Amino acid sequence: MAAELKSATQGRTMVLTISNPEMRNALGPEIYAAGVEALNVADSNPEVRSVVITGEGSTFCAGGNLQRLLANRAQPREVQAQSIDGLHGWIEAIRTFPKPVIAAVEGAAAGAGFSLALACDFLVAAEDAVFVMAYSSVGLSPDGGGSWSLVQALPRQAVNELLMFGERIGPLRLQQFGMVNRVSAPGGALQDALALAERLNERAPNAIASIKELVNDAAVAPLDRHLASEREHFVRNLYHANGGIGIQAFLARQKPEYP
């Protein structure tokens, strides 16, 4: 069965399911391209307020297909470089997508699967899920922005331990690090992710988009530039129709309903 990225809509949330069960939902170029296309579709559809990424069955994603990687060693280096560019295109699309993206992790998130989960804005994981940067175990180094995401969240020594030893880490430990938002009962990650998504769906989409952009930029922007960006976003959102809806509802002690 060919690997594919299944797309479905539940309420105002698009659910993207990595489906490659024979290879434990390993990733490949067809998945990357479908991921970018799905986000483009979700971006252009105002009815979609959030996206959840999950894996089919009991595994989130085993990372790269090692059989394909081994075969690529007989190909020109550009073949593998182009494949990684496809993965990185999807990662960048997730990071710059103006709506919240939530990873729902059951089972293993290994290698690029771990990197993919870290690229999302929220991470919900079953309590028996396993995260591992498995690259060094097969003589490789990270891709998918995994090293970048870890360095944003953890001290250098902790990042080195995860990347150089390739040891497994559980969701409770990642939650202590502030990298996992919710720990679910086994089998419950997707439902908890959808519940989290629905809470986000109730908020003003323009404000959520501004917050995501500001948070992404804060790590690299100097303070003066970031303060200017905050000013621009605040003024834009105050004069947006949703700004009036939100303030008036709060003053009236009512729940706002954003179009």
Image (cartoon, rainbow, N blue to C red):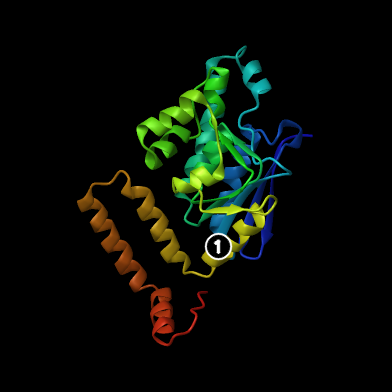
Q: Residue at x 54, y 24 (%)?
A: 135
Q: Amino acid at mark 1?
A: Arg
In the displayed structure, does residue 87 sit left or right of residue 17? left
In the displayed structure, 81 sits above or below 148; it is above
| Residue 48 in view here | no
The image quadrant of residue 156 is top left
- Farthest residue, direction top: 74
| Residue 198 in view here | yes
Q: Residue at x 46, y 47 (%)?
A: 176
The image quadrant of residue 65 is top right
Image coordinates of residue 206 in percent, x first then y, are: 43, 65
Q: Secondary structure at mark 1?
A: loop
Q: Residue at x 32, y 45 (%)?
A: 219
Q: Residue at x 24, y 57 (%)?
A: 227
Q: Which sits in the foreground, 192 or 143?
A: 192
Image coordinates of residue 204 in percent, x first then y, are: 46, 69
Quadrant location, the N terminus: top right
Number of numbered tags placed on the structure image: 1
In the displayed structure, does residue 245 sit left or right of residue 230? right
In the displayed structure, 65 sits above or below 237; it is above
- Farthest residue, direction bottom: 252
> Which residue is the site of mark 1?
49
Image coordinates of residue 104 in percent, x first then y, are: 61, 50
Image coordinates of residue 124 in percent, x first then y, are: 57, 51
Q: Which sits in the foreground, 75 or 200?
A: 200
Q: Residues within 10 Å of mark 1 (few under 14, many from 20)?
A: many
- Farthest residue, direction right: 1
